[in-house]
Amino acid sequence: MAYFLLKSEPDAWSWQQQQKVKLDPWTGVRNHQAANFMKAMRLGDTAFFYHSNIGKEIVGIVEVVREAYPDPTDETGKFVCVNVAAKESLARPVTLAEIKLNKKLQEMHLIRQSRLSVMPVTDAQWREIIRISNTK
DNA sequence: GCCAACGTTGGC
DNA sequence: GCCAACGTTGGC
C-alpha cells in the first residue's frame, strides 16, 4: 500500500470541511507531475492532509475511495482527480517547521519542491510522521 | 507584502 | 526550439 500527501489551503477546503463529507473529489489539480501521482493512487491507499499557507501542518489522514478519473472541472479533459474520504485526525498536527528540523524527513517533496500539491510519501516518512504526531 | 521556484505563453 | 515575460504557489 502506497502513501501520499495532499495539500489544501484551508481557506478553500479545510480538514474540518473534509471531515463533514462522506467523500470529496480532489479536483483542480493542473500540474502534470501531481496528476501522475494521482494516477498512481490505488483504492485503499492513504494520504496525509496538509494545510498550506494557513497552519502549514499535516492535520489528518484520508483514504482513496475512487481511483483516477477525468476531472469534471477540467475543460481540456487532460487532467484527472480522485475521490478521498477522511479517515482520522492526527492526535497532534505535525508542522512544516518540525518536518524541516527532522533528519528523517529531509527528502520529502514538501520541503524540496514546495509548490507540488500532490506527492508520494515513503513508508519510512509515513511512519515517522505518525510517530511524532502521537497517533495510534 | 515580498520573493523564490517553477510552469506556461508567445514572439522570434 | 529558445527564451523573456508573466502568472501562480506557497513560505517567510
Image (tube, coloured by chain):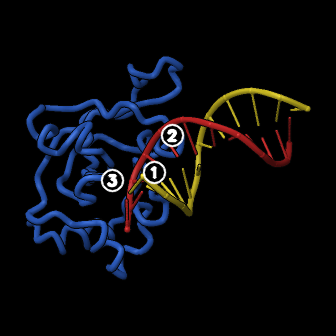
Chain colours: A blue, B yellow, C red
Amino acid type, callout 2:
Asn
- B2 shown above or below A74: below
The residue where tag 2 is placed is A31
Quarter of the image with the N terminus of chain A in it: bottom left
- Who comes first in sequence, dot 2 or dot 3? 3
Residue ID at (26%, 73%): A128
Q: Which mark is residue A116?
A: 1
**Amino acid at dot 1:** Leu
SS at circle 1: loop
**A11 or A84: which is nearer to us?**
A11
State the image coordinates of residue A124 (x, y, percent, origin top left). Answer: 33, 71
Q: Chain of mark 1?
A: A
Label 2 neighbour load within 10 Å: few <14, some 14-19, many 20+: few
Q: In the figure, A75 relative to A7: above or below?
A: above
* Front residue of A115 and A29: A115
Q: Mark 2 and mark 1: span between their CA atoms?
A: 8 Å
Give the residue pinned by disc 3: A5
Labels 2 & 1 near each other (Cβ < 8 A): yes
| Residue A76, position as x, y percentages in the image | 53, 19
